Amino acid sequence: MTKEQVLLLDEAGNHIGLADKAEVHHHDTPLHLAFSSYLFDAEGRTLLSRRALHKKTWPGIWTNTACGHPAPGEQMADSVLRRLTDELGLPGVRKVDLILPKFRYRAEMPNGVVENEMCPVFRGIVVGSPSPNPDEVDSVEWVDWTEFAESVLDGSRDISPWCRLQVEELTRLGPDPLEWPVAEAHDLPPAARV
């Protein structure tokens, strides 16, 4: 079985190496390429997922629909679709759009484990119900976007640190997530422009 690898980046977003995913997250996690995705249904509800309880980073925390790391040479949109299928059993995503190409964050857990990612954000439209993979996702919930965003911004919803920062940026794009402008691929980090 092939080990999953992540693309290591320099501060400009250029690919400078590879690391095994299982070993990359620790107290001094190197900058690497990832993505986040938010799925919506026709009513504008977003699908949240609760991370599996055995995950190394932020186990059991509620977050956006899915996150992941593109494989070496893999298109970002293809990696999003792969993770939506692997994590949530959702092969029927109709469309995936790049929304926040330059999102980047660093967050530290109480035990010292760090996330350090250039993490473009994508939006998808889905028809169908998820079938979560218990190795990745503990549970899921459909929520109204407006109510969700308000609860994240006012601090009343416990959510992953990257999701909180993303919601702050996403709400600046307008109240209707289905109307957010699509970003240009040339604004992605260079390593993500495969």
Image (cartoon, rainbow, N blue to C red):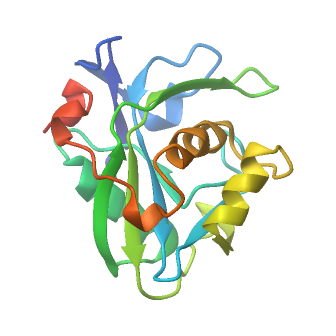
Outermost residue toward the right? 156
Q: Quadrant of residue 65?
A: bottom right
Query: Residue 5 placed where, x, y %?
Result: 35, 37
- Vertically, is 161 above or below 182? above
Does residue 60 appear in the picture of this structure? no
Outermost residue toward the front? 174
> What residue appears at the point 54 percent right and 26 percent down from the top-left corner?
105
> What residue appears at the point 36 percent right and 30 percent down from the top-left corner?
102
Q: In front here: 80 or 25?
A: 80
Query: Residue 118 placed where, x, y %?
Result: 41, 28
Query: Residue 93 placed where, x, y %?
Result: 34, 76
- Vertically, is 41 above or below 76? below
Q: Quadrant of residue 34?
A: top left
- 45 left or right of 103? right
- Vertically, is 173 above or below 64? above
Query: Residue 20 placed where, x, y %?
Result: 41, 32
> What residue appears at the point 49 percent right and 53 percent down from the top-left corner?
174
- 89 left or right of 6? right
- 106 left or right of 143? left
